[in-house]
Image (cartoon, rainbow, N blue to C red):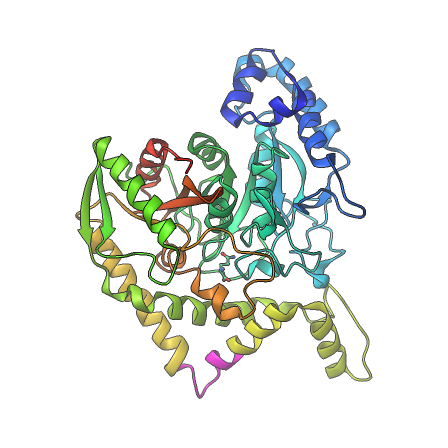
């Protein structure tokens, strides 16, 4: 097979070929590296700026995987020798992890994230670390300290965010799969924009140990892949209780029910979004109906408070989590003429505009005078929303919405942060409630991919995988 063809394989396909001895991990890894090097512009790792660093030991890792296969034979894990790209906020021992920020530009991880340790155990190959929106805030990977990641389907457009580099890498065949992190949609949003699958597990199903924290009560590591089967494979490898993360949960005892009832909100769902996305979404639902699914009207009244509750909680936790980057302990350290100036210089120059904005707003909503009016109310809204979702899942197995209200926008098009926040309308609810959710390509709008999102009850990822495999992406 040619390099390009090898790089286009799904993980499941590549795994079978590796197991049958038809290809080696070294060939597969070289095929991905060849895609990365294609038309490489000066000073960048690749033409889409998907990678911040391509690991120089990728071929060594692949050779080690091939040797291990000789020894393990049929016992080899399906991910043995599979080249994966890793978002720049997930720690790999001995590699840089900068969260795409000047603040951590030269930080080298001293330990593996649990998800990475599990993938290493399986024998996966880490091909490089991918670009992202600084500290996982935003919806487009435009404000990385190292430049925007471009959408492989149209390089004048954003790749989505914040795991934009991971999504672009998978879409362009630069890696067979990737890890991203999802705080309010950051795996699903870029998956939708780049035409790949993005999966956010139930809160706690994957350990957050070794993930640079953005919003600890929302963050989840999740896979980006070409197919639902591939996402399931990675999830199976990285899930489970971890003594290093007290919020992680035992995923073995979870109820695995699947059913054929899809909850849909009545009326137009995209609101101020794209009518074309709405049309592809309706066609997709019709298609699922023809395949035996039942569409059930649902209503979740508190959804109108979701964006406000999400952003208030996000700002609050971000401001608290980023307080550790003070220019003293680690990260960027700049000298001022007093200790206070050391702090303000390091934080002022180390953080980009969006991080600084959220730190300030977070300090405000948590301040003694405003806590009850903002953070306290957001917490109540979140509880109410969780309750309403639980109730809805008594009568449906999954809830469907488009993943994003529009296809990928033009780089630089959204000037106000609020415009970007509003685009998160469908994705943030699963983080507020902790439910698992998946984005699967459902078709295109003027050649740009768009995804359908399914959300399920806590622990019922099985239902998501089942319905996700049934979606047929329609080219229009
Ligand atoms: N766009 C959302 C935000 O800006 C989601 C970010 C994420 O999931 N990391 O917060």
Q: In this view, does 474 lie above or below 192?
A: above
In the rendered image, residue 445, in percent from the top left (x then y), is placed at 44, 45
> In which quarter of the view is residue 8 placed?
top right
Is 283 situated left or right of 245 in this image?
A: left
Q: Which residue is drawn at 37% across and 63% down?
A: 272
Quadrant that contains the C terminus: top left
Is 54 situated left or right of 165 in this image?
A: right
Is 17 situated left or right of 104 in this image?
A: left
- The answer to whether residue 10 shows anywhere in this view is yes
In the rendered image, residue 448, in percent from the top left (x then y), is placed at 49, 44
Q: How many labels does the image show?
A: 0
Q: Is residue 195 magenta?
A: no
Q: Which residue is drawn at 67% across and 23% down?
A: 3
In the rendered image, residue 59, in percent from the top left (x then y), is placed at 74, 28
Magenta stretch: give its range. 363-372
Quadrant that contains the N terminus: top right
Q: Is residue 386 above or below residue 380?
A: above
Q: Which residue is drawn at 68% across and 60% down?
A: 101
- The answer to whether residue 258 shows anywhere in this view is no
In the rendered image, residue 332, in percent from the top left (x then y), is placed at 75, 65
């Amino acid at each position: 097979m040619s390099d390009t063809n090898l790089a286009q394989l799904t993980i499941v396909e590549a795994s079978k070929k590796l197991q049958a001895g038809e290809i080696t991990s070294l060939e597969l890894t070289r095929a991905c590296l060849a895609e990365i090097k294609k038309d490489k512009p000066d000073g960048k790792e690749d033409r889409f700026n998907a990678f911040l660093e391509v690991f120089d030991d990728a071929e060594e890792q692949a050779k080690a995987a091939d040797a291990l296969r000789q020894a393990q034979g049929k016992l080899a894990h399906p991910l043995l020798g599979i080249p994966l790209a890793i978002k720049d906020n997930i720690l790999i021992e001995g590699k840089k992890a900068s969260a795409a920020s000047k603040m951590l530009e030269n930080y080298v991880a001293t330990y593996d994230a649990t998800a990475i340790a599990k993938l290493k155990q399986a024998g996966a190959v880490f091909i490089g670390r991918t670009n992202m929106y600084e500290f996982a805030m935003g919806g487009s990977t435009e404000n990385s300290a190292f430049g925007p990641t471009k959408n492989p389907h149209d390089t004048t457009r954003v790749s989505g965010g914040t795991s934009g580099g991971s999504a672009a890498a998978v879409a362009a065949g630069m890696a067979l799969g990737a890890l991203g992190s999802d705080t309010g949609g950051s795996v699903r949003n870029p998956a939708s924009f780049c035409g790949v699958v993005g999966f956010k597990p139930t809160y706690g199903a994957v350990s957050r140990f070794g993930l640079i924290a953005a919003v600890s009560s929302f963050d989840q590591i999740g896979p980006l892949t070409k197919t639902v089967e591939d996402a399931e494979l990675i999830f199976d490898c990285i899930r489970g209780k971890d003594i290093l993360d007290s919020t992680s949960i035992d995923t073995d005892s979870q109820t695995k029910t699947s059913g054929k009832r899809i909850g849909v909100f009545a009326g137009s769902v995209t609101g101020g979004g794209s009518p074309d996305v709405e049309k592809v979404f309706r066609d997709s639902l019709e298609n699922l109906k023809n395949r035996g699914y039942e569409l059930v009207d649902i209503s979740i009244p508190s959804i109108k408070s979701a964006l406000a509750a999400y952003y208030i909680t996000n700002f609050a936790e971000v401001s608290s989590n980023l307080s550790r980057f003070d220019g003293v302990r680690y990260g960027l350290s700049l000298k001022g003429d007093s200790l206070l100036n050391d702090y303000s210089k390091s934080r002022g120059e180390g953080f980009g505009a969006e991080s600084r904005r959220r730190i300030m707003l977070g300090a405000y909503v948590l301040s003694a005078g405003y806590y009850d009016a903002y953070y306290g109310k957001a917490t109540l809204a979140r509880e109410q929303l969780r309750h309403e979702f639980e109730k809805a899942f008594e009568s449906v197995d999954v809830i469907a919405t488009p993943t994003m209200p529009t296809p990928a926008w033009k780089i630089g098009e959204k000037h106000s942060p609020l415009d970007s926040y509003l685009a998160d309308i469908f994705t943030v609810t699963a983080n507020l409630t902790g439910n698992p959710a998946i984005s699967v390509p459902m078709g295109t709008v003027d050649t740009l991919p768009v995804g359908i999102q399914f959300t399920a009850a806590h622990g019922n990822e099985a239902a998501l995988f089942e319905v996700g495999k049934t979606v047929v992406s329609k080219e229009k």
